[in-house]
Image: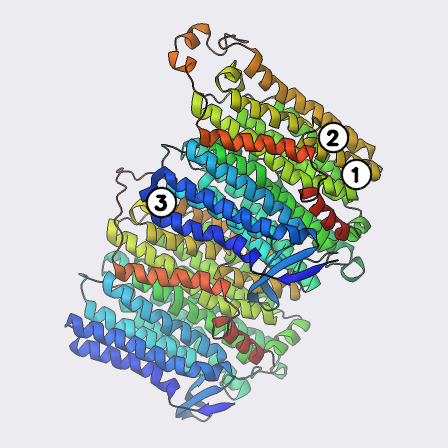
Amino acid sequence: MIVHDIRPLLAPTISILCAILIFWRGENTYLRRIFSISAAILKWVIVLSMLPGSLKGVIYVTELIPFTPGISFLLRVDALGMFFGMVSSTLWIITTVYAIGYMEGEHARKRFFAFFALCVSTTVGLAFAGNLFTLFVFYEMLTVSTYPLVIHEETPEAMKAGRKYLVYTLTGGSLILFATALVFYQANTVAFDQPGILSINSGVGILVVIFAMFMLGFGVKAAIMPLHGWLPSAMVAPTPVSALLHAVAVVKAGVFGITRVVYNIFGVSLLKEMASKGADVASVLMWAAMITIVLGSLMALMQDGFKKRLAYSTISQLSYIVLGVSLLTPDSVMGGIVHIVNQAFMKITMFFVAGAIYKKTHKKNISEMHGIGHKMPITMATFTIASFGMMGLPPTAGFISKWYLSLGALAADKPIAVIVLLLSSFLNAIYFLPIVYRAYFMKPLDGDTTMDEAHWTFLVPCIICALYTIGLGLFAELPFVPLELSRIAVTQFFR
Amino acid sequence: MLEQVTSILPFLAVFIPIFFVILIFIFGEKLGIRMGWLAFAASVSTLFIILLMWPGSLEGTIFKTHLMMIVPGIWMFIRADQLGLVLALGAAILWSMSTMHSIGYMKGEHALRRYFSFVVLCLAWTVGVATSGNLFTYLIFYELFSISTYPLIVHEETPEALAAGKKYMIYILVGSSFILFAIIYTYFLAGTLTLSKTGILSLAEHGRVPLLILFWSYMIGFGVKAAIMPLHGWVPDAHPIAPAPFSAILSGVMVAVGTFGIMRVTFNVFGASLVRELGISLPMAYIVAFTIIVSSLLALDQDNLKRRLAYSTIGQMSYIVLGTVLLTTSSVWGAVVHIVNHAFMKGTLFMCAGNIIKQTGKKNISQMRGIGSKLPLTMAAFTVAALGMIGVPPLAGFISKWYLCIGSLDAKEIVFVVVLLLSSLLGAAYFLPIIYTAFFQKPGEETFPERHGGHAEDAANPKEKSTPEAPKVMIIPILVGAAGVIIVGLFAEIRYFPLSVIKIATSYFLK
């Protein structure tokens, strides 16, 4: 059922308004905080108000301006869009609280918070995009508005990382634009539809080209190897940026784009038809994802920088989602989609912890973190829970993703994917547990074991995310939790 | 006559310990070593609840609690059937003994709150494993148990302890991966994970090859924890390094949880008839027979007492697996009852070793000359438990061995009777010298003076002469354990003893 509604437009607009207000009166710390937090909550409420409808299968649509016949600026909230929008706006609130604490005393806070708001605005816009063109616009806006956040420190290292980031993502963006034009040329529309808008009549060759370009384009932000190079460098950004953007918004935008292309532009039946004609592009994507999962984990093992290790872990985990999408079975896609939110919460906990430790002790490297668990027991406890989630231990959220991904892989008759997932869980244990071990079971180098916990603005976000990790493992089947929404998204794909 | 009753009791048995963990966490710092009594109270309360279910279980009742749905069709589902209750009962008794013993043993140690919290948590997870109604719930508790054990193994935080902990983690995580794979695959094949009386898989429906892959994945996965060779590597490092009361739990129950997993897979996932059809019991039986012999030979070679006990555990666990896979009524009786019997015997032995370490600081058997006159009660309990291990009638170990032998004969596999008898002989060879050294050698009488110093050193140490017997909290548990070894052996066939409950369980597994 399609409902015309203003709310899909309202949600991104609020964040833009917030950004404008911060640019206008942002020198004042209190006004800046009030703007940021109230916009975050307001937007969350708006997105939430559409959730009951989405759970019933309602699709909310706002059509704005037609650019050319067939291409308009279109916002359309289906279950998948709702899912991504909900994740981003929920985490925005948590990250805003964290950022307020973290950025205390930093320079250029006005710029930081304004662009922070702008980023989230574009992320939600991207989630609600109703066609490839709108998606592309928001995708590029996201790139541009993240740049000031990546280079926030303005050190030479940061500037270099920023440049690398722009080169990678803008190149990816131009590929997407080109592919979008090809889609329009073939299908005469770019609107997302079930089950896809292309047909085999276009010829297998051109379809393969379109698919490859989309994957290369979105693959940059989704950090599929070998397109991942920007992500570890971008870790020079302040931790809240790494947390929200490089664990949720930016990277998930890439994964989200891939999902859209696979299910709403191509569609399952077309991809299967292509496979039967010898162009099994989904399998190629699957192999790329599996290689990234394993290599990402192996490279994470070698990192000593805490945030760098998290970055490589992100690369690996993102490919879980891509793997789920590429397996083309309902269970696997559901596992993939639900991993968007599960990975987001788990990884954001870890980044929050990394930031809290850095702020408290100025330690960036894992090798310096002896006995940090004596100093900051609660912080490290949340990290431990998140690690268990990453390993996919039951009953954490990570297990639910892994369960569905594995079932989907078996249904697709690809047991190799199950083995890759299990191997990756094991590697996750190898690179996360030593951190926990070092924190709790090794004595601090200075011998000082007095408790000195982080400020509440650090602790509360960590605790909320850690509780989510357990809660969603235990109560995944309750109504109004992500799994239900992702199930609806999947039924829309496989209708 | 089987009747399933929805009841809150299984739920309470799992969650009462968790409640106590919270208490320990809140009041632990204030109470100091006295928080051990909270841990003891947790164990006794759990034991009480399990005993409440015991009479019903004898009538064939199965108690169950549905908690919550995790993925569609899969509940977090706790169900105390007869097999599970036997393990839970053994665990609760052993924990009661061990937590009491800890109060003495852990006096003056560091990180007490961590120690007692995790010990009680482990009890909750063990009871959870025992009473899981489906593989999914089983997996959850099993993983929680594996992880919660780590801080206890590395408790001393010495380099050796940390190395043993690391080894443990790697072994267990690899094992868990196999189990997880097997469980996912089972769900994919059977569409359910509920543990049923006669299994949920069938040869006609799923084909031979997938079932074989499945079976061996389970065996490798659980084999790591059950210490079946060559997957036993973590045991000789991890068991001796943990504090003695927890070594008792590790050896008494934790490895048994692995064998329990093998039982669940054999009886409730595959079903006895399917295992027979697949012809996988004999290869498995030969592997564990190999383990029994080799581990006993290796035990002979250990001078460190706790290490010797750890190798003995490896062999004993394979008794249980042997009895399980032979699939005759008697062999299964012997296997299940050995879980309880072994928990009593090995728990007592490790706690005795703890008393020796705590009172004299001696870890090696070669240093224990004449220790029987200094610690008479400890060594008396040790002797009873060791004789039980060897299988001297009428002690607990004899009952297990008796049924295992009968079962092997029923299965017409005489070779396993020989293996069991040989293992008893080897058991005598590695346990009796300890008793001999303790009681019949005089302190200072040196077998190999050049290796271990000499008379002068011992004589020069006046403290050693006045070593007192361990305090009451450390003596009572081992005396209870030793009494248990005798009582369970003497009265094995009496109603209300584990064997009668096991007979009910077996009657429907092997139907």
- Residue that extends furthest to the left in the rendered view of this protein: A28
Numbered circle sitting on residue B407: 1
Task: Specify the quadrant of the image occupied by residue A416.
Answer: bottom right
| Residue bearing the label numbered 2 | B420
Q: Residue at x 68, y 32 (%)?
A: B397
Q: Same chain, marks 1 and 2?
A: yes
Amino acid at pointer 1: Gly
* Cα separation between marks 1 and 2: 12 Å
Residue A9 % position (x, y): 36, 86
The C terminus of chain A lies in quadrant: bottom right
A91 and B97: which is toward the camera: B97
B111 above or below B186? Answer: above
Q: Secondary structure at mark 2?
A: helix
* Cα separation between marks 3 and 2: 46 Å
| Residue bearing the label numbered 3 | B28
B281 and A267: which is toward the camera: B281
Amino acid at pointer 3: Gly
